[in-house]
Image: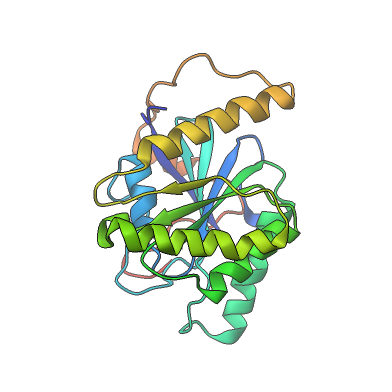
Amino acid sequence: MNIVSAVFDCSAPDLDSCPDESLPEFAFIGRSNVGKSSLLNMLSGKGDLARVSATPGSTRLINFFTMNRHWRLVDLPGYGYAHVARKDMAQFNQAVSDYIELRPNLFRVFALIDSGLPPQKIDLEFVEWLAVNSVPFVLVFTKTDKIKPTPMRANMAAFMDRISAWNITPPQTFTCSAKTKHGRSELLSMIAATIAAERSERGLSVPDEEPLPDPAPAAERKSKAREGCVTRPNPARPW
């Protein structure tokens, strides 16, 4: 898949504020500081698509980006951010839960795991929740440039060993590095294949060619933000 157009759509605080359900969506989520924003920027080929912050947990809303005018990349708030007020954390978690469980055009969840760490309880609990709720997901082990291959493989094997006890079909796994762009082509190919398979199963047509870049000027695209969505806040504020 060749990314020729990546456009910010809107930010939504809850399921009711999400954009229409006309496009396939692929959602990315992980523990705070797992490198999610850097990975999304790497996939899109745009260094500023998703906001990269030195403060973990800066993604507070569900952020939608339209890719190639045919599908959406969805940036979900990370879990495990201790500095968010408890009442706000509950709201974020509820919004994420509602989106993952109830969004009909969500084709796949990409659960991001830090390859430099042994299995973390919070990651295992979240992945188990996905499995229990029959949510289609894949595992993406991030930051492979920051750890040597042998301990990385050991951490991945330990994680897979832990989830093998759940008696589920082993999920598809990927490794990636936002710094070296390792894994980019594999992830995009997986997305393209999933779109084709899902559209075929649902009796929908599959585009024969990659779309041209969106010709609309930036100001015009911004004016078309979906009603009910929250516009991108000032970059000086976390979102």
Q: Is residue 192 visible?
A: yes
In front: 226, or 66? 66
Pick the quarter of the image with the N terminus. top left
- When the figure is inspected, residue 103 is found, relative to residue 160, above or below; the finding is above
Q: In the rendered view, does 161 fall on the left or right side of 47? A: right
Q: In the rendered view, does 81 fall on the left or right side of 115? A: right
* Occupied quadrant, residue 183: top left
User: How many circles with numbers are drawn on the protein?
Assistant: 0
For the point 64% across and 27% down, which residue is it?
197
Which color scheme did the rendering employ for the protein? Answer: rainbow
In front: 34, or 75? 34
For the point 29% across and 71% down, which residue is it?
54
Please state the horizontal and vertical placement of residue 106, each as a whole percent of the image: 64, 44
- When the figure is inspected, residue 26 is found, relative to residue 195, above or below; the finding is below
Q: In the rendered view, does 152 fall on the left or right side of 158? A: left
Please state the horizontal and vertical placement of residue 180, each as a whole percent of the image: 24, 47
Q: Is residue 97 visible?
A: no
* Occupied quadrant, residue 117: bottom left
Please state the horizontal and vertical placement of residue 222, each as a whole percent of the image: 43, 43
Please state the horizontal and vertical placement of residue 105, each as a whole percent of the image: 67, 41
- When the figure is inspected, residue 209 is found, relative to residue 120, above or below; the finding is above
Pick the quarter of the image with the C terminus. bottom left
For the point 56% across and 75% down, which residue is it?
121
Return the residue found at the far top.
208
